[in-house]
Image: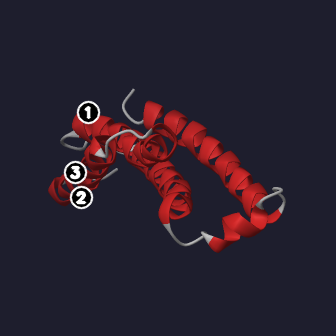
């Protein structure tokens, strides 16, 4: 069912990035080297870690909304499968940021995820413009 996986993956990813947010709170407020962490809060890896947290939750939420819309307008929208898959692939963006920070991965995953999510949102917008008889 188109949309079901977007909602399921969106909720799981949101839960993971919410938990990651608690790790960031720990590092800022309770870790033994919190003063050093705070000193570099706005630059480098610390900034990217926060960027991943924010975008992870945003892209998870977008998947939930997209999934809900795909289910609600089942078989009435064009590009349903493409919209669904592109939104799921969009999760690569925040995961790619984390892969850069922790694994030194290249930014290709960030770019693929960002382009996929943008394409998903645009395609869904076009599909709604083309919608004839919403029920």
Q: Earlier in the sequence, mark 2 or mark 3?
A: 3
- State the residue at coordinates (84%, 59%): 30
Q: Is residue 40 above or below residue 19?
A: below
The percent position of residue 37, horizontal first and vertical second, equals 68, 64
Point out the image quarter for the N terminus. Answer: top left
Q: Which of labels 3 and 1 is toward the front?
A: 3
Crowd tier of the residue under label 1, counting other residues whose Cα lies within 10 Å: few below 14, some 14–19, many 20 or above: some
Q: Which of labels 2 and 3 is toward the front?
A: 3
Q: Is residue 32 left or right of residue 94?
A: right
- State the residue at coordinates (65%, 73%): 39
Q: Say which element carries label 1.
A: helix
Depth order, front residue of 26/61:
26
Q: Say which element carries label 2.
A: helix
Q: Is residue 111 above or below residue 84?
A: below
Q: Say which element carries label 3.
A: helix
Q: Earlier in the sequence, mark 3 or mark 1?
A: 1
Task: Identify residue for label 2.
Answer: 125
> What's the distance in space between the residues labelled 2 and 3, CA to CA?
10 Å
Crowd tier of the residue under label 2, counting other residues whose Cα lies within 10 Å: few below 14, some 14–19, many 20 or above: few
> What's the distance in space between the residues labelled 3 and 1, CA to CA?
13 Å
Instruction: Answer yes or no: is residue 132 visible.
Output: no
How many numbered markers are drawn?
3
The percent position of residue 38, horizontal first and vertical second, equals 69, 70
- State the residue at coordinates (40%, 43%): 96
Task: Identify residue for label 3.
Answer: 119
Depth order, front residue of 130/34:
34
The percent position of residue 73, horizontal first and vertical second, equals 34, 44
Task: Identify residue for label 1.
Answer: 81
Q: Is residue 40 above or below residue 83?
A: below
- State the residue at coordinates (44%, 37%): 6
Q: Earlier in the sequence, mark 2 or mark 1?
A: 1
> What's the distance in space between the residues labelled 2 and 1, CA to CA?
14 Å
């Amino acid at each position: 069912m188109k949309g079901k996986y977007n909602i399921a993956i969106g909720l799981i990813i949101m839960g993971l990035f919410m938990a990651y947010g608690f790790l960031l709170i720990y590092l800022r407020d309770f870790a033994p080297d919190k003063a050093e962490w705070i000193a570099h809060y706005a630059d480098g890896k610390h900034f990217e870690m926060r960027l991943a947290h924010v975008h992870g939750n945003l892209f998870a939420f977008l998947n939930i909304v997209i999934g809900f819309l795909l289910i609600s307008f089942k078989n009435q929208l064009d590009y349903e499968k493409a919209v669904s898959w592109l939104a799921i692939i969009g999760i690569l963006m925040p995961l790619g940021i984390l892969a850069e920070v922790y694994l030194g991965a290249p930014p290709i995953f960030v770019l693929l995820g960002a382009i996929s999510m943008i394409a998903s949102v645009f395609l869904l917008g076009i599909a709604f413009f083309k919608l004839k008889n919403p029920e």
